[in-house]
Amino acid sequence: MGLLRTLLIIVIVYYAFRFLARLFAPILVKRMASKMQERAQQQYNQQRQNTTSAREGETVIDKKPRDQKQSNENVGEYVDFEEID
């Protein structure tokens, strides 16, 4: 009798979970989608704000120039290989 009671409880919990998931899943998905849209909008606004800080016609360089003093001394030793048949 205990085994049947346990199986019945498991089945009831399973179907209750499926029922509640069908009710609340669309609400949760809609909420997650709106949060993702809000974050994307914030990132877009932040990116747009960063690019509009320069005046029109002004040249902006975003990358750092490379040092010309850097040499290839730290690269290592060159080894020439030959193919042996």
Image (tube, rainbow, N blue to C red):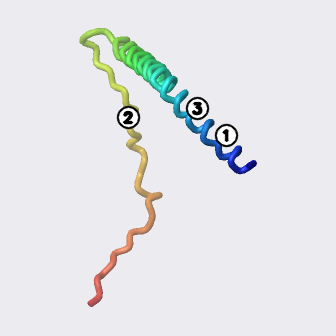
Q: Nearer the viewer, residue 7 or 18?
A: 7
Q: Seen from this angle, which residue lies furthest top?
A: 55
Q: Position of residue 31 (x, y in %)?
A: 48, 19
Q: Amino acid at mark 2?
A: Pro
Image quarter of the C terminus: bottom left
Image position, residue 74 (x, y; %): 47, 58
Q: Amino acid at mark 1?
A: Ile
Q: Which mark is residue 65?
A: 2
Disc 1 vs disc 2: which is toward the camera? Answer: 1
Q: Position of residue 60 (x, y in %)?
A: 32, 20
Q: Residue at x 51, y 24 (%)?
A: 24
Q: Which residue has dot 3 on it?
A: 16
Do the numbered discs 2 and 3 sit on residues whose CB atoms are within 8 Å?
Answer: no
Q: Is residue 84 visible?
A: yes
Q: Which residue is mark 1?
A: 9
**Secondary structure state at the residue bearing disc 3:** helix
Q: Residue at x 34, y 75 (%)?
A: 80
- Which of pointers 1 and 2 lies earlier in the amino acid sequence? 1
